[in-house]
Image (cartoon, rainbow, N blue to C red):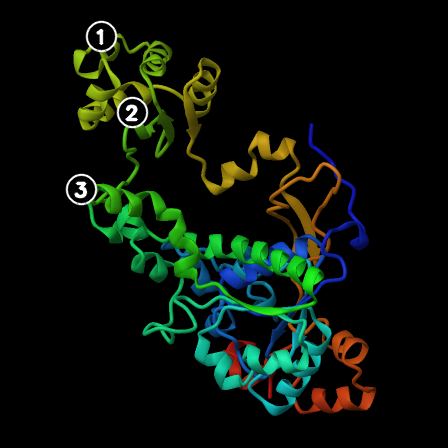
Amino acid sequence: METKQETPTKSDLPLDGVKVAAITVVWAGPHCTQVLAEWGAEVIRVEPVDAIQPYSRGAERIAPREQLIEMANNGITLSAYPDFEPGDEPWNRNPGFNSHSRNKKSMACNIMTSEGKQAFLKLIKEVDVLVENNVPTTIEKAGITYDTLKEINPRLIMLRMPAYGLSGPYKGYRAFGTHVEAMIGHHYLRGYPDGTPDQTGEAFTADAFAGLLGATVITAALRYRDLTGEGQQIEMPLAEGFLSNLGEFILDFEMNDRVAGPQGNTHHSHAPHGLFPTHGVDQWIAIDVSEDSEWQTLCEVLHADLLQNDTKFATQLSRFNNRDALHKELAKFTVEYDKNELFQQLQVAGVCAGPVMDDVELLSSPQLINRGFFEELDSPVIGNYRYPGIMTKWINTPNTLRTAPPRLGEHSEEIYKELLGYSDLEYKELFEQGHVGDRYPDHLLPEFLRAPQ
């Protein structure tokens, strides 16, 4: 039975009253503010309407429906609009942006213009937190470093999330999560022993981790401010933030002078450990055996007497030393089973296992459905769709998604007039000059979206 939660009022949530300004792109920064917004913070995305912000709403690479379908047929689907229709406002229909933008507001403001910077500095007076994950030189060129902003708001907490740091020889280098992971060795470790790092594909784990770590350190800084009254800048490079996750391999080298090498799906002592084919086309199950008793149980469930009696696989050490042959032989048995049925049989028997799910199967997962994880949000430009829900459940603080992703500049009038104190006339002038609005100007858009002349 699906678990139902009451929609919380804003005052029920722990970050109620905290205002966050966000100049964020791609995933790390937006993911950080997603978590803050989910727990009650008022997150205001600061984004230009008179220029296209790359790696945000996808407006720099808008394509017509026919081209999107062709891309999807070639496996490129991440940025496909609902039903492949860009619509009149494709920047509001981008799934990459919308996935992390629920519960947020959008303020049209270009910090690179004098009018935009003036509005932004007014905003800084009113907020508790500023989150940005741009190349450090971008913030410096805009003249909005912490040294400047703390003079306006001494209680401001500013989280900066560069790829490699605000100092050092790599300070100005541009990178996404995949480049960061390459620099710190994660791509190498994720690779397969008989392959090359390029075969690992994209995971962007550093981005995902940075979002959660960023939200954590901000809440700690808010606590510190409560105790001392002091704001501060937090520098959290993606590379250094994620590097601690590889501590085991670093210490192994430091202590034992041993290079771990590519890991793939292997484990340093468990065998079998990996993905094994099951009945059907491209169907798989993950299995992990850590001790001899589990191996015996696995063989019994699979009716694999030949494996169970093979002396090469009798002990944990012998299985590990012969793991390539073991995995090859084990696959001959697992391929006869349905992955979900085998998963449940192994779990009941006490063997760690899990089916490999694709995105369609995930949306119909009985576990996630039972827990009410996916939640529907309705938007006039996107439609009604399911979104990944809240990542944690608090016994005394029920929570659920509240508002759909914001349209470009949707909350500008509210923020400029009610929060920043702009008059109706001042706001009208900004609108007429193109500094605020809800649509990019025609000269920035592909021809098929431009207004007819």
Q: CA distance from mark 3 to mark 1?
A: 29 Å
Residue drawn at x 44%, y 13% as measured from the top left:
349
Determine which quarter of the picture holds residue 123: bottom right
Q: Position of residue 31 (x, y in %)?
A: 55, 57
Near-viewer residue (7 or 283): 7
Which quarter of the picture shows residue 95? bottom right
What residue is pinned by disc 3?
194
Decide if residue 237 is on the left or right side of residue 293.
right
Q: In the rendered structure, are the residues bearing label 2 and label 1 in contact, judged by CB atoms less than 8 Å apart?
A: no
Left or right: residue 306 compared with residue 335: left
Asked whether the viewer can see residue 156, the reply is: yes
Residue type indicated by callout 2: Pro
Say whether residue 283 is left or right of residue 417.
left
Q: Position of residue 378 (x, y in %)?
A: 70, 54
Q: Residue at x 41, y 69 (%)?
A: 165
Q: Name the amino acid type tagged 1.
A: Asn
The residue indicated by pointer 2 is 272
* Vertical relation: 428 (above or below) 270: below
- Spot the residue most to the front: 228
Q: Would residue 110 be seen by someone viewing this image from the given angle?
A: no
- Checking the image for residue 309, the label placed there is 1
User: At numbered mark 1, what does the secondary structure look like: helix, strand or loop?
Assistant: loop
Crowdedness near tag 1: few (<14), some (14–19) or many (≥20) residues, C-alpha within 10 Å? few
User: Secondary structure under badge 2?
Assistant: loop
Quadrant in the picture for the C terminus: bottom right
Q: Earlier along the polypeptide chain: callout 2 or callout 3? A: 3
**Numbered badge on residue 38:** none
The Cα–Cα distance between marks 2 and 1, rounded to whole angstroms, is 16 Å
Classify 69 as above or below 389. Answer: below
